[in-house]
Image (cartoon, rainbow, N blue to C red):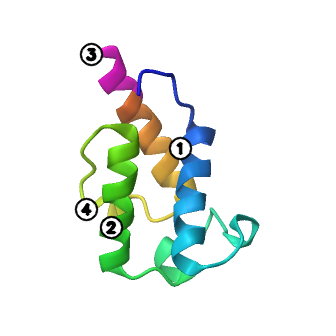
Amino acid sequence: MNEKLTRDDIKSHLVSLVAEVLEVPPEKISCDIPVSKLGVDSVTVVELFEKLGTWLQMDIEPTLGWDYPTIDAMASYLEGQYSAQVASR
């Protein structure tokens, strides 16, 4: 993926992944509460990060969910990491 992704792009993709796992419409996903409170267990979070990492073409540490527990926080952090990775190519 060579395109420039924004925080909103990453957030939207995360919302879609979580909605798919929870089998709910994306608009039902709150981005400002911890993902664990949405009903996503730790094993599923790791699986989500693997899918997200593949999409972003980068490694995502499994502890990301602890350090950045909400979708908003994850998207902000990942935007910075993704931008740094793209800049270093």
Quick one: label 3, few (<14), some, or many (20+) residues within 10 Å?
Answer: few
Q: Amino acid at mark 2?
A: Glu
Q: Give the percent coordinates (x, y) of residue 55.
A: 40, 43
Q: Amino acid at mark 1?
A: Ile
C-alpha span from label 2 to label 1: 16 Å
Question: Measured along the vertical axis of the image, is residue 86 above or below residue 22?
Answer: above
Q: In the rendered structure, are the residues bearing label 2 and label 3 in contact, judged by CB atoms less than 8 Å apart?
A: no
C-alpha span from label 2 to label 4: 9 Å
Mark nearer the viewer, 2 or 4: 2
Q: Which residues are magenta?
A: 83-87
Q: Is residue 39 left or right of residue 58?
A: right
Q: In the rendered structure, are the residues bearing label 2 and label 4 in contact, judged by CB atoms less than 8 Å apart?
A: no
C-alpha span from label 4 to label 3: 23 Å
Quick one: label 4, few (<14), some, or many (20+) residues within 10 Å?
Answer: some
Q: Which mark is residue 47?
A: 2
Q: Is residue 14 left or right of residue 24?
A: left
> Which of 79 and 58 lies nearest the eye of the viewer?
58
| Badge 4 element | loop
- Tell me the residue that label 4 is attached to: 62
Q: In the rendered structure, are the residues bearing label 4 and label 3 in contact, judged by CB atoms less than 8 Å apart?
A: no
- Tell me the residue that label 3 is attached to: 88
C-alpha span from label 2 to label 3: 27 Å
| Badge 1 element | helix
Q: Residue at x 30, y 67 (%)?
A: 46
Q: Which mark is residue 10?
A: 1
Quick one: label 1, few (<14), some, or many (20+) residues within 10 Å?
Answer: many
**In magenta segment, residue 25:** no
Mark nearer the viewer, 2 or 3: 2
